[in-house]
Image: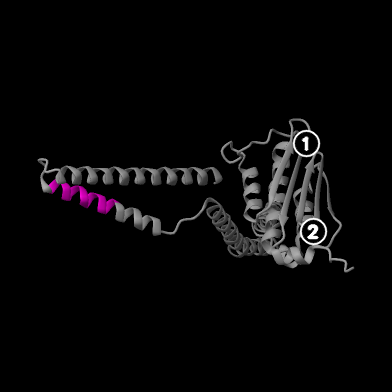
Amino acid sequence: MYASLKSLIARSVSRSHARRLILALCLCSVLVSLWVYLQDAPQPLLILLLNLATFSGVALHQWRSRKAIKFQPQELAERLLQVQENERHRLSRELHDDIGQLLTAAKLQGEWLQRRLPQDLQNHCSVLCNTLNETLAKVRDVSAILNPRQLTSLGLEASLRAHLLKTLENTQVCWSLECQQRLTGIPEEMAVAAFRITQEAVTNILRHAQAHNLLVRLQRLPEGLSLVICDDGLGFSPATDPGREGQRGMAGMTERADQLGGTLTVSSQPGKGTRINALFPWAPRALKRASPPKVLE
């Protein structure tokens, strides 16, 4: 998505340069025609009027395009992330409300059939009911991943702990979540960004890193919320431009940090694990509250 965004911006810039070049050529054509006409050189008046009309049309189009709504790359990235988050919420609702209800109804019908089928069909019906139970549990898990509702009710720390517990339950990864301060009052967009970055990092660890140990640390600093994710996996060579080099997960993490005016750095080498440091700065009012009080002399 982010590579497509950059290519779209590059195409828009190139088109803008092309329009300006055409406008400059039309202006030169008008000026040359006008100069030739004023010098009493043999030139039909129709050519001068045609050039003037062409220049007027191109100039009007350029003026209208400048008045059109334009997004800076940062604003466009923020809107894309917002659209992505809204789409995740919509899919989560559909999974939970529509597909979840249908699977629940099928589960109840299976249990009803199991009580009335003869003994020789009980095993088949039990397999069917177990399959429906597993499918319903998977749908609920995917719905929770797409839209972590517990962020609002439980908070960031409890939501991350529940996600790590559920995701790493049947793996060999030993994990720990360190949070020595209370995280009450964290802005919602900051909590969502920290949760999504951790979620993407854990996914990458399971897919690629083959790590045995994972550490997630949340710390409330005077300058902002600090998130550190460390693992002892295989490591990799971080790209300078993750979006263009196919590291879309890393590009998504960087975009989420940039959206809040924060920073994200990735330290990794092949065979030496990975460390991700993210810092989300407080808003001006929150920064004032987080700063230590001044001592009056």
Does residue 218 lie above or below 275 as drawn? Answer: below
Question: x, y (%) of residue 102?
Answer: 60, 62
Mark 1 or mark 2, whichever is nearer to me: 2
**Callout 1: 10 Å neighbours few (<14), some, many (20+)?**
many
Point out which mark residue 229 bears. Answer: none
**At numbered mark 2, what does the secondary structure look like: helix, strand or loop?**
loop
Question: x, y (%) of residue 278?
Answer: 73, 49
Q: Amino acid at mark 1?
A: Gly
Q: Going from the N terminus, do you reach mark 1 or mark 2 first? A: 2
In front: 71, or 155? Answer: 71
Residue underneath mark 1:
273
265 left or right, relative to 90 = right
**At numbered mark 1, what does the secondary structure look like: helix, strand or loop?**
loop
Coloring scheme used: one colour
Question: x, y (%) of residue 139?
Answer: 65, 56
88 left or right, relative to 47 = right
Residue underneath mark 2:
222
Work out which quarter of the rendered image holds the C terminus and state it.
bottom right
Query: Where does the magenta region start and end?
Result: 46-58
Q: Residue at the spot x=72%, y=63% of the render?
A: 151
Q: Amino acid at mark 2?
A: Pro
**Callout 2: 10 Å neighbours few (<14), some, many (20+)?**
some
217 left or right, relative to 113 = right
Q: Residue at the spot x=60%, y=42% of the render?
A: 248
Q: Is residue 217 visible?
A: yes
